Image (spheres, helix red, strand yellow):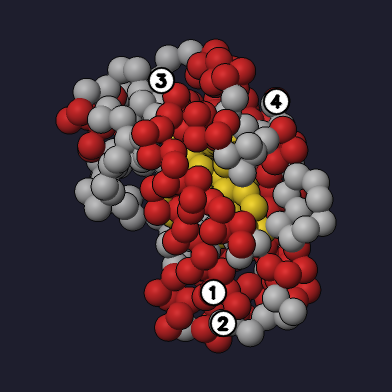
């Protein structure tokens, strides 16, 4: 019996598989197509998808594209102010979409802005650590984009984590453990109670593993790693087995192609993991990460 068969049809929020990592870039005008894809995912047992949407009230197109990878095909708002579209997709999905607020363009009164978006319907936070142009995405750093110092930028990130802690919000936070391990360590030391997902296995499994060993509220996902999972099955199987209580199902899918989440489910099954481990990765760990965000959705 597959994990899909063991986790669907049991009733209640999150009865099935939860994809903890996807992105918007999708206009509400595409809602009908998104709904069809979500229905096909439900047939595979994927009942919830956490989708990050960006908000922008200060940046022009040139500034914006400096913080977005050039491979992204944007089918949503031209200036990446996605809040309205994503919340509408979430409403129409009847809880299948859990909206996360992407904070890369956020500035000014951080807690006030986050509180306002939370009241509008966002259920968690998406962050990304971009202090310089040496990041793994090859995009411009936030300090250069905003004309601020790295110290000011780090202060903003700490305010975001502080808000998440105060409001019991899950955080999806892209950060490279190889290059920014000191920042990762500082965030976890200051906010050990925040349930945070550092995705993509921390960008580097060797550098990231010690953090998983030390911090019980730290999670990760294998989004973006599909080719590596297929090419190095034994290695990825061993890593997931070692951290079976921390790894979550995540795809990095874009909402207009959200059905692609199922490809990650296929790759996960191909690793030959037990049903017990699959259930942890697909259901139990995502539930612990998302917490009240999933229940409220």
- The numbered dot on residue 166 is 4
Residue annotated with mark 1? 266
Q: In which quarter of the image is residue 163?
A: top right
Nearest the viewer among 237 and 278 is: 278
Residue 226 placement (x, y as % from top left): 44, 70
Circle on res. 30: none
Q: Assess disc 2: are there few (<14), some (14-19) or many (≥20) residues with their C-alpha within 10 Å of its C-alpha.
A: few
Q: Mark 1 or mark 4, which is nearer to you? A: 1
Distance Cα–Cα, label 1 vs label 3: 40 Å
Residue under circle 2?
270
Residue count near mark 1 (Cα–Cα under 10 Å), binned few <14, some 14–19, many ≥20? few
Query: Mark 1 or mark 4, which has the lower sequence index?
Result: 4
Disc 1 vs disc 3: which is toward the camera?
A: 1
Give the mark count: 4
Would you name the residue on which mark 3 appears?
107
Q: How crowded is mark 4: few (under 14 residues within 10 Å), some or many (20 or more)?
A: few
Which type of secondary structure does the marked residue at label 4 adopt? helix
Relative to 233, 28 lies left or right: left
Q: In this view, does 116 lie above or below 66?
A: above
Cα–Cα gap, marks 1 and 4: 37 Å
Residue 146: name its quadrant. Answer: top left
Q: Is mark 3 on a helix, strand or loop?
A: loop
Mark 3 residue crowding within 10 angstroms, few (<14) / some (14–19) / many (20+): some
Residue visible at 62% across and 49% down?
48
Residue at 74%, 60% in the rendered image: 8
Q: Do the residues labelled 2 and 1 touch (CB within 8 Å)?
A: yes
């Amino acid at each position: 019996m597959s994990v899909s068969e063991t986790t669907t049809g049991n009733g209640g929020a999150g009865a099935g598989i939860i994809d903890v990592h996807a992105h918007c870039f999708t206009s509400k005008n595409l809602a009908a197509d998104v709904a069809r894809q979500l229905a096909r995912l439900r047939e595979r047992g994927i009942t919830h998808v956490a989708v990050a949407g960006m908000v922008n009230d200060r940046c022009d197109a040139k500034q914006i594209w400096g913080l977005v990878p050039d491979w992204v095909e944007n089918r949503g708002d031209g200036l990446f102010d996605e809040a309205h579209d994503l919340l509408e997709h979430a409403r129409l999905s009847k809880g299948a979409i859990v909206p996360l607020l992407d904070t890369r363009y956020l500035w000014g009164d951080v807690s006030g802005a986050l509180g306002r978006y939370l009241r509008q319907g966002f259920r968690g936070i998406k962050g990304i650590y971009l202090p310089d142009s040496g990041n793994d995405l090859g995009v411009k750093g936030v300090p250069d984009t905003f004309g601020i110092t790295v110290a000011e930028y780090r202060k903003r990130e700490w305010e975001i984590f502080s808000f998440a802690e105060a409001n019991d919000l899950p955080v999806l936070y892209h950060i490279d453990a190889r290059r920014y391990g000191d920042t990762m360590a500082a965030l976890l030391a200051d906010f050990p109670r925040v349930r945070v997902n550092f995705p993509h296995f921390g960008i580097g499994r060797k550098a990231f593993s010690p953090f998983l060993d030390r911090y019980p509220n730290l999670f990760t996902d294998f989004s973006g790693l599909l080719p590596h999972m297929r090419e190095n099955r034994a290695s990825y199987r061993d890593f997931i087995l070692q951290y079976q209580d921390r790894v979550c199902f995540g795809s990095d899918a874009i909402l207009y192609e959200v059905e692609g989440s199922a490809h990650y489910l296929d790759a996960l099954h191909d690793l030959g993991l037990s049903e017990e481990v699959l259930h942890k990765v697909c259901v139990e760990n995502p539930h612990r990460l998302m917490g009240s965000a999933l229940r409220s959705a």
